Image (cartoon, grey):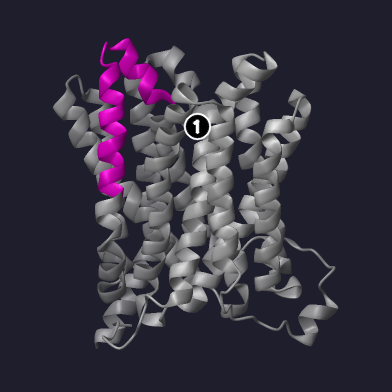
Amino acid sequence: MTPSQGQRLWTIDYVRAFTAMLGVSVVFITLMAYMAIYAIREFQVDETAGGIAASAFVAGGALSRVLIGKYLDFVGRKRTLAVTLAVFVICSLIYPIIDHYGLLVLLRFIHGAAFGISSTVISSVAVTLIPAGRLSEGLGYISLAGTVANAIGPFAAIQLHQHASSLWVFGFTTVCAVVSFLAVLPMQIPERQPSPEEYQRRWRVRASDLIGFKAAPVATVGLLTTLSFSVVMTYLPSYLVGMNMASTASVFFFIWAMGMLLVRLFAGRIQDRHGENVVIPGALVALIAGLVIISLADSLWQFIIAAFLGGLGHGTVLPGLQAVAVKRTTPERVPIAVSTHYIALDSGLAIGPPMLGFIIGLAGYPYLYVAGASLALLGLVIYWLAHGRYAKVAAASVQK
């Protein structure tokens, strides 16, 4: 469908949804960047335990997404969002009074579960607020919240840690959580009433109640894309330190974020007008090229080129795939499709570093990024076989 000029996207409720997503995303990224440092310093644990304190948030988010897709409309979208964001605020307030490492990990898990539910619901609600002909564009703008959070979160965590204290870090994240909570309270959220048949089988849990199988093929592409990105986020700083190019890391991630920001301003609009095959394959090729260049680079300008290409590809693929997942499913199963998409992304971030990190000791960093490029290439193949070739035929039939 070609978007018409009369389809208004930036309604007040859409702006509120964006604000809520930005707030929870900043909390997520800021504490992911800070938590390992905090756990090691405050509880005298080793680096592995510090990493567990950080990643427990992702685990809680992934588990909660599995269940929320099925039960969201039974509880109510507005009620679910208000309650989980209230829990999100409370968790943000509790960090300074935690005095035991085990309690910290438990809090991180609960906090992550609240994030997983709230971000899934916000995305599901955003789908109902976006005009049908502007779905990719609208989801692309919502995903900008994550891009902005990636720019703000680590900077805020490091600066507040170095120049203030942990109380300032947790105060900052609490303010962001409160902003999200306040943003959703006045929202007019469209609710969907489950059918009598759905009520009858609400306690019956099958695989199809937890995973959107129509969305699964494109979610698999998202998983592979995130696996590829995870080795950049986790291992590139240490790679550059070993090359005596430590200062290049901050430049690299800034350029990557700018590439994501730039492309998300227009890629969704192009996808709505011309179809996903005009956007997603090219974005995957850009990501593959960026990873290959990283494996070969030995100068600042080469890493800048790699970061820009990688950011363009990464920034385009994920919201584009989410739009495809929503289009492939029926309206009543949109929350399940959205949760399936995010489960895939969470899984990629969680399992990528331990799954691929052994390559460093076996063959070196360059081959790690070749492996990342190979996974993105596999994602391109899966996308084309599972969806792209059919989307092309469908577009051709419409033109006829």
Give coordinates of residue 248: x percent, y percent: 25, 23
Give coordinates of residue 137: x percent, y percent: 34, 69
Of 272 and 244, nearer the camera is 244
> Within the image, what quadrant is residue 338 found in?
bottom right
Camera sees residue 115: yes
Quadrant into which the N terminus falls: bottom left
Of 20 and 271, nearer the camera is 20
What main secondary structure does the magenta stretch of the protein show?
A: helix
Task: State yes or no: residue 309 in magenta.
Answer: no
Which residue is denoted by mark 1 in the rendering?
33
Residue lying at 26% horizontally and 76% vertically, measured from the top left = 273
Task: State yes or no: residue 257 in magenta.
Answer: yes
Quadrant into which the C terminus falls: bottom left
- Which amino acid, mark 1? Ala
Residue lying at 42% horizontally and 62% vertically, measured from the top left = 142
Q: Magenta residues, as a range?
A: 234-260
Q: Is residue 387 above or below residue 245?
A: below
Residue lying at 34% horizontally and 78% vertically, measured from the top left = 394
**Count of picture labels:** 1
